[in-house]
Amino acid sequence: MNAIDLALYLHFPWCVQKCPYCDFNSHALRGEMPEEAYVDALLRDLDFELRDAAEGRPLRSIFMGGGTPSLFSDRAIGRVLDAVRRRLAFAPDIEITLEANPGTAEAAHFAGYVAAGVNRLSIGVQSLDNAQLKKLGRIHDRDEVFHAYDMARTAGFTNINLDLMFALPQQTLAEAEADLRGALALAPEHLSYYQLTLEPNTEFGVRPPVLPDDELAWDIQERGQSLLAANGYAQYEVSAYARPGRPARHNLNYWQFGDYLGIGAGAHGKRTADGTVRRRARSKHPRAYLEHAGTAKALQEDREIARNELPFEFLMNALRLNTGFAIRDYNVRTGLDWSQLTAAKLARERGLIVEQDGQVRPTGLGHRHLNGLLTLFL
């Protein structure tokens, strides 16, 4: 029996418009969205993945990301989940997340998503400052955030994440704190609180706005972490904070080197079988994906991870977790022996990691210099 958990990621590639900071595989919607055709493509793609290697493991989580999945109707989401349920077993306590924007039209679908089986909602707030939302290219305003949140609760969602960014263009410490206090007042179960970064091949990457300097960004982060802790949110990953018992199971699976099927335009997947770890990625452009989904032509990448790459592959995510990882998990999920890893000894000697009771975790120094720590394992 495979002891590694299995998850499913479904990618929905369209947005109303592309945000200037976004480097995800998202495409501004031009004309009518081909909802039915895209759902058909997802199911052909899933059948192709399962035909290639059948799965006996139940799904522990499903994550529908984008793009903007909430542009799809509740009927379309229900059709997808029903079809997945016919093909794969669901764990009794499966977590099923859908990403949504706070727009009023999308919030109208919330009750239908609950009826379809979605039990966790992730709302892309990003800021509660209307001027910042405009700079970020967001199409909602502050009032729509509160309205969408109320609609989500009324619809029956008892597990909600809010995405919030800090160190925004010309943002002050007081403005960042006000944003976070506003989000905390809503009392979501989970907060993704992360710093805006300028990514290449984005509008902000080409024409960068003026951002807070490193010292101010650090002050904002420290103030935010203190506020989150004071309000009962435990930091369990670099940018993830949750109330007790509410960490995102799907994201934990990524960070713990679990397996996941990646279905949809540009989706990535990872599967372990017969002692090998394999990664796949789908065609990024929706048109090409729609044409080839369900065939090998839809694969942009399909490769086995070399054994000498496995330590870095495992650790680049596992070391993001405050609690680190179990040595047993490293051994099982990579097929390697932690005690034989020379770089681990070097990291211990430099005070970057500690080992105790079968666990490995980064020290405070290791967290602050995470990139340097990870390069030891390249």
Image (cartoon, rainbow, N blue to C red):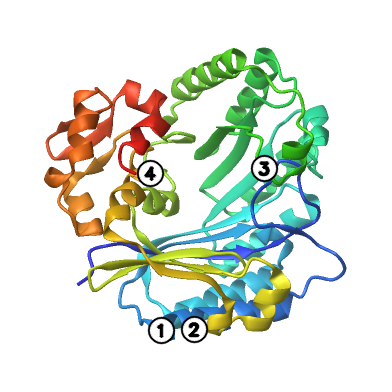
Please say if 273 is above or below 156. Answer: below
Q: What residue is shown at x 44% (from left), y 23% (from top)?
A: 229
Disc 2 vs disc 1: Cβ atoms closer than 8 Å? yes
Q: Which mark is residue 48?
A: 2
Category of crowding for the residue at label 2, using alpha-carbon neighbours closer than 10 angstroms: few (below 14), some (14–19), many (at least 20): some
Q: Tell us which disc is closer to us: 3 or 4.
A: 3
Q: CA distance from mark 3 to mark 4?
A: 21 Å
* Left or right relative to 241: residue 35: right
- Locate the C terminus and report the quarter of the image it occupies: top left
Task: Of the two numbered discs 3 and 2 on the same chain, state the one appearing first in sequence.
Answer: 2
Q: In what element is the residue under mark 2?
A: helix
Toward which corner of the image does residue 99 lie, by quadrant? Answer: bottom right
Q: Which residue is mark 3?
A: 200
Three-letter amino acid code of the residue under disc 3:
Pro
Disc 4 vs disc 1: Cβ atoms closer than 8 Å? no
Three-letter amino acid code of the residue under disc 2:
Phe
Q: CA distance from mark 1 to mark 3?
A: 35 Å
Q: Which residue is mark 1?
A: 52
> 96 and 195: which one is in front?
195
Toward which corner of the image does residue 339 lie, by quadrant? Answer: top left
Q: CA distance from mark 3 to mark 2?
A: 33 Å
* Left or right relative to 80: residue 229: left
